[in-house]
Every structure is written in structure tokens, then in C-alpha cells.
Image: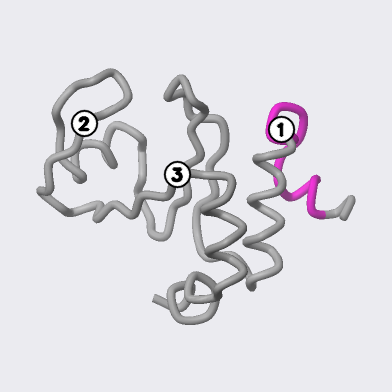
Amino acid sequence: ARMKSTVLNQADVHDAYRSQFLVYSIDVNGDTPLTDFQGKETTEKAFSLVNRVRATPTLLFFNLDGKLVARFTGPTKNKDEFLLLGRYVTEGAYASQPFTQYKQGK
């Protein structure tokens, strides 16, 4: 809830993420139907279980083939860290270093 009121409600955050990502919010306990990356019908809850989402918020980043490439569990400290997380993914830094190491170099 804290991220919604302090980070996710910022216009520049919306602009930055929506220009680089398709953004979907999923209720880990929800029964809303959705189609997974393999084209299989599932629910929000089942999708969350398959992707090992055990805490919220959890941010999952998938590539265009539906492969999970980055994960961040828990709230970011602030808007700047959230924007940096987006850059970490778009730059492909996830392939060579964890986010904590990436942050130290910025």
C-alpha cells in the first residue's frame, strides 16, 4: 500500500514504465482469469503460485518470450530506486549482476 501512495502514483513513474513495459497488476489471491505466456488459461492466484510470488509487492519482469528475467520482492525505498529498477531491466544489467550490485555502481 505504501508504494501505491508514494511511488506508483507519480506521473513520471507511469511515463517511464509504460514507455518500456507492459504493466499488469495481479491480485495474488484473485480468481480473475488470465492467459499465461504459454497460452494456458489460469487465474491470478495460480499464476502467482507458479511464479513463486510469496510476498507483496513482487515485481516480475518477463522478456517478450515470456521468460522471467528479473524479480524484485518488497517495496522499493523510494521513487528513484523504482525508476533505477526499470533501467536495470531495460539495460539488460540483470544478465550480469544482481540489482543490489547495480545500484552501488549508480
Which structural element holds mark 2? Answer: strand
Q: Position of residue 49 (x, y in %)?
A: 26, 38
Residue found 62% across the figure and 61% down from its top? 82
Residue found 24% across the figure and 55% down from its top? 27
Q: Nearer the viewer, mark 3 or mark 1?
A: 3
Which residue in the protein does label 2 denote?
Answer: 35
Q: How is the image coloured?
A: one colour
Was residue 95 drawn as part of the magenta stretch in this picture? yes
Which residue in the protein does label 3 denote?
Answer: 22
- Amino acid type, label 3: Leu
Image position of 23 (left or right of 83): left
> Residue 75 got which mark?
none
Q: Which residues are magenta?
A: 92-103
Between 69 and 83, the one lying in front of the other is: 83
Residue 7 is drawn in which quadrant? bottom right
Residue 92 is drawn in which quadrant? top right
Mark 3 touches mark 1? (CB < 8 Å): no
Residue found 87% across the figure and 55% down from its top? 106
Majority SS type along the magenta span: helix
Q: Taking 33 as reference, is 30 above or below it?
A: below
Between 103 and 12, the one lying in front of the other is: 12
> Residue 92 got which mark?
1
Q: Real-space Cα distance between discs 2 and 3?
A: 15 Å
**Mark 2 or mark 1, earlier in chain:** 2
Between 74 and 70, the one lying in front of the other is: 70
Q: Residues within 10 Å of mark 2 (few under 14, many from 20)?
A: few
